[in-house]
Structure formats: C-alpha cells, structure tokens
Image: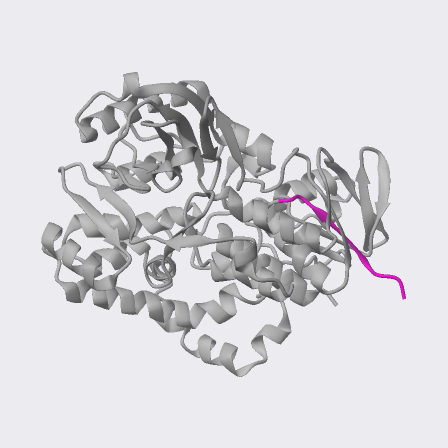
C-alpha cells in the first residue's frame, strides 16, 4: 500500500512540528515555504557582524520541543541543548527601582519583598492561583481540540469542566491582579503577561493569569546558539525523517475536489496530496488560498479582533551595559494609558513599555567584542492603515529618551547599525494578517472557544496549525497545535 502524502503550507515552527509528527506516522511530507528560510517568525539575520533572532526571544516549556525528538526515536541532546535561566527577566520601573525575576521562588519572593514591601505570602497565593488555573485548563484548552466530541467524553475533561468556575473568567486580569497585590508595581508586573498573547490586561479575562505559571513554575531557558537553533534543530530532525522542504515556493491555491482538499497549486503547478495542513494565518488561508470559495469562509472567525503587533528595532550597540541582562523590561509610567493607546486609539503611547533582549549576554559571538546586539520591542496595534512612518519616527525618539534616562547616558552614539520590523513588514514576511502576532486577541472570556479549529468542518482533509488557530500563539501553543493536528489525522 503506497504511503499517504501530506502537503504543509508554511515552514513556521508549527508547520515543521506537524511535518515531524506526520512523518513519524508514516506520511510522505512536502513543505512549501514562500521565504528562502524556515521558521516563520522564529528566524534570524545578521547585520554588520551582529546576529539577531528576528522574532520570539523567550523560551519556555522546552519539553514540547524535546518531545518531537523522542517521538522520532532520537536523542534530543544530539540535536538541541539549552540552559535554564537563573534570572528570567530584569524589570526597570520609572521610579528607579529594578526587580530581578528569579526562577527560584524563594529568591523571587525575597527580591519582591525587599524592593516593594509585598509579603512573600502574596506571591505564594498568586502562584497557587496560577497553578490551579493551569491544572484546570491545560488538559481541556491547550492539549486537545475544543471541537471534537471525543475531548468531552473522558473523566479528566469532565472534572475540569466542573471546576471552570475557579478559572476566574469573568474578571479582567488587571482587576484580579489588583486584588492580589497592594503595590502598583507588582500589579503592573503581572498585568504584563497579557502581552504574551497580544492582549489587553484591562479587558482580557483573569484566566490568562495562568501564563506566569508557565514561566515561573516550569522556568525560562536559553537555547545554545540562540532562539533560531530551535528552528534549525527541528528542520534537521524533519529532514532526517525524510521531510522535503521547498523554499521560495509560495502556495497560490488550495485545490478542492468537491468538498475535499486534493492538493495545492504552487507556481501554477498542481501538487497532489492526501491531506493539506495550513500553517499560514487562517485569515490568509481563506482569503487568499481559498478565494474561489467564499461560501466556505468562517466570517465570524475571520472578522474577530486581531491581537496586537510589535515594533522592533534591531540595534548594533558599540558598547556593553553590565546592568542589563538577557531579558529586560522598562515599564511605562501609565500602563492603562499605554493599553488605551494601543487598543482604543490604535496608536503608540509616548512612554511605552520597552522590552530589550540581548542574546550575546549568553552567546558572545552574537556581537563583536565589547559590543551588544539589542532587540528592542514595544507593543503596538495591528495595522489598520496608520501612518506608520510617522509613528515609528516618534517611537524611536521616545524609546531612546526612555532608555537613556534609565541607563544614565545617551545611547544614541552607541547605535552603529539598525534594522526595523513593523506591522506592515511582519505581515509581508510571515503572512500574519495586519501584522498581528497571535492571530485573534484574547480580550474575551470566550476567546478560547472562538479560535478556528485545527480541522475544517467544511473541507475534508484540510487541517490548520500555528498561532492563528487553536490553542493560540507563542512557541509552546504553536507546538501543541501540531500535536492536536497529528492526533486528528488518521
């Protein structure tokens, strides 16, 4: 009996993971990628001797990566290695204090108590709440499809459903956090986790307070060789399993035979397959690749509010700053005003929270000797036609003023080269509609149920993976989407 063939659109992290899982199941796999490289947002580039990870820079839940190697009968450590961080992130506040977010819970509680006066019990109570939400939601909302009857016909799911009242879905993250902490700086600290899936803590349900558990309980890590080594190692594994990657190969159309996906059109040629998996943003999958079938469009899903996007400056810095760590956050002076600017005004606050990642703190070769590679990011709205050139110019000035004030010196002369990524270029490079990083936002208590399923209900043999579908965006959830697809495929 001939092997079945799976065609995968897009070599993002979820597309690669799906390819690996289906190859293990015995499928012949062809991956079609529009760019000349794999990884999607999880890519890299170099400029004048500085190497940058272009996209995601925080690595959590490494077990989901390791699982792909063990599933294939390989030793993960022969492909991929990483280190656990002692300090997850260094936080800088406008009042001049800084807080090191230690991975060790006791050290973290002591640090927070020393800097803010919050008692250790407050952090312990919060951690317990976050852990409880994870225990209730993980099995149902993350690891399985919400769109299969099978999901709801087992004891663990029923137990979770009976406890859903405990996941705090009807308060906002901010309101819940304000109830846990007296110090406004700690409220802001935990409100920030809404940005991990492109949402607004003043609207997103407090269920999202599960996110700190993933970081603080399971830890944060740094991959040897940088974040792009995740992509590199998984591509190597996939190729070892016989997966074929076709680069510079944009897909023109998903070809249907009645209500069944039978293949793809790539550069005008028909490529036949037994099933199709789209790792492209679900919006573009329908609007572009299924444009001839508007009657099949899930309009309610496609018209949902998008997640936020990002504005990133990649700066080669001709100096070293020992007061900075791998991950650094410089908070805004008014968090609510910042999120109002993003979500209500569709603009950028004049004193935004700045995330600064410096990978050469752990990989010295990522910058010349005595220098640093700065990945400088702020959260911005999705692209709805704003004057981005003007917004970027103003934001650049404000970011430089902010960082210079916090670091005690003008950083302008330290910047020797620069690249910029904004919502427009995020969309064009990664087919993410409006440049949104996580598909739809999670600003509703029903958001998890409103994400697109991992299999089409109208087109047989068409599946979906990646950050724009269930269970959501970010590396861990994208990898879980691949697992859900593979479990659905016969």
Residue at 64% x, 49% y is: 236
Question: Which of 313/157 is in front?
Answer: 313
Q: Position of residue 349 (x, y in %)?
A: 31, 31
User: Is-magenta flag for residue 239?
Assistant: no
Q: Position of residue 382 (x, y in %)?
A: 47, 35
Q: Position of residue 226 (x, y in %)?
A: 46, 42
Name the side, left or right, on which 58 lies relative to 282.
left
Q: Give the residue at the far top of this rendering.
A: 413
| 302 is higher (above) or lower (below) than 119 | above
Could one spot residue 449 in this view of the protein?
A: no
Residue at 68% x, 66% y is: 488
Please state, as top left, top right, bottom left or bottom right, where the C terminus lies in the image.
Answer: bottom right
Name the side, left or right, on which 111 lies relative to 33.
left
Q: Which residues are magenta?
A: 1-11
Residue 182, image quadrant: bottom left
Q: Give the residue at the far right of this rendering.
A: 1
User: Is-magenta flag for residue 6?
Assistant: yes
Could one spot residue 317 in this view of the protein?
A: yes
Colouring scheme applied when the structure was drawn: one colour
Q: Position of residue 268 (x, y in %)?
A: 84, 34
Please state, as top left, top right, bottom left or bottom right, where the N terminus lies in the image.
Answer: bottom right
Residue at 53% x, 66% y is: 143
Residue 26, image quadrant: bottom right
Q: Give the residue at the far bottom of this rendering.
A: 155
Name the side, left or right, on which 77 lies relative to 310.
right
Name the side, left or right, on which 178 lies relative to 228.
left
Residue 293, image quadrant: top right
Residue at 53% x, 28% y is: 424
């Amino acid at each position: 009996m001939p092997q079945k063939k799976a065609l995968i659109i897009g070599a993002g992290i979820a597309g690669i993971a799906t390819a690996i899982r289906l190859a293990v199941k015995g499928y012949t796999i062809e991956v079609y990628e529009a760019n000349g490289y794999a990884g999607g947002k999880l890519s890299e580039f170099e400029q004048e001797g500085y190497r940058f990870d272009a996209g995601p820079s925080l690595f959590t839940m490494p077990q989901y990566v390791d699982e792909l190697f063990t599933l294939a009968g390989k030793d993960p450590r022969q492909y991929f290695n990483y280190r656990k961080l002692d300090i997850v992130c260094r936080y800088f506040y406008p009042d001049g204090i800084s807080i090191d977010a230690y991975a060790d819970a006791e050290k973290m509680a002591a640090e927070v108590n020393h800097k803010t006066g919050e008692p250790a019990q407050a952090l312990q109570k919060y951690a317990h709440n976050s852990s409880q939400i994870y225990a209730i939601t993980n099995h149902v909302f993350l690891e399985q499809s919400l769109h299969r009857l099978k999901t709801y016909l087992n004891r663990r799911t029923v137990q979770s459903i009976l406890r859903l009242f405990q996941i705090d879905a009807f308060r906002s993250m901010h309101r819940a956090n304000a109830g846990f902490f007296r110090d406004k700086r700690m409220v802001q600290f935990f409100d920030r986790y809404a940005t991990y899936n492109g949402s607004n803590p003043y609207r997103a349900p407090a269920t999202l307070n599960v996110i700190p558990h993933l970081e603080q309980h399971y830890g944060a890590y740094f991959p040897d060789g940088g974040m792009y080594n995740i992509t590199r190692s998984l591509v190597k594994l996939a190729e070892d399993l016989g997966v074929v990657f076709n680069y510079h190969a944009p897909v023109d159309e998903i070809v249907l035979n009645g209500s069944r996906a039978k293949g793809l059109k790539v550069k005008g040629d028909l490529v036949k397959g037994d099933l199709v998996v789209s790792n492209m943003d679900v919006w573009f999958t329908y609007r572009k690749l299924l444009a001839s079938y508007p009657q099949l469009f899930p309009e309610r899903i496609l018209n949902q509010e998008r997640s936020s996007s990002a504005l990133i400056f990649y700066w080669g810095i001709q100096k070293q700053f020992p007061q900075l760590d791998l991950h650094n956050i410089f908070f805004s002076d008014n968090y609510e005003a910042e999120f109002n600017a993003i979500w209500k005004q569709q603009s950028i606050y004049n004193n935004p929270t700045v995330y600064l990642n410096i990978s050469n703190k752990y990989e010295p070769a990522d910058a010349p000797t005595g220098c640093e590679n700065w990945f400088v990011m702020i959260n911005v709205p999705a692209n709805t036609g704003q004057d981005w050139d003007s917004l970027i110019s103003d934001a650049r000035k404000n970011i430089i003023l902010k960082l210079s004030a916090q670091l005690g010196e003008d950083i302008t002369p330290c910047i020797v080269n620069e690249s910029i990524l904004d919502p427009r270029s995020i969309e064009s490079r990664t087919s993410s509609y409006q440049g949104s990083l996580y598909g739809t936002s999670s600003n509703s208590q029903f958001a998890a149920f409103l994400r697109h399923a991992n299999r089409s209900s109208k087109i047989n043999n068409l599946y979906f993976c990646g950050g724009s579908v269930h269970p959501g965006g970010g590396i861990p959830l994208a990898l879980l989407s691949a697992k859900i697809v593979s479990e659905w495929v016969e």
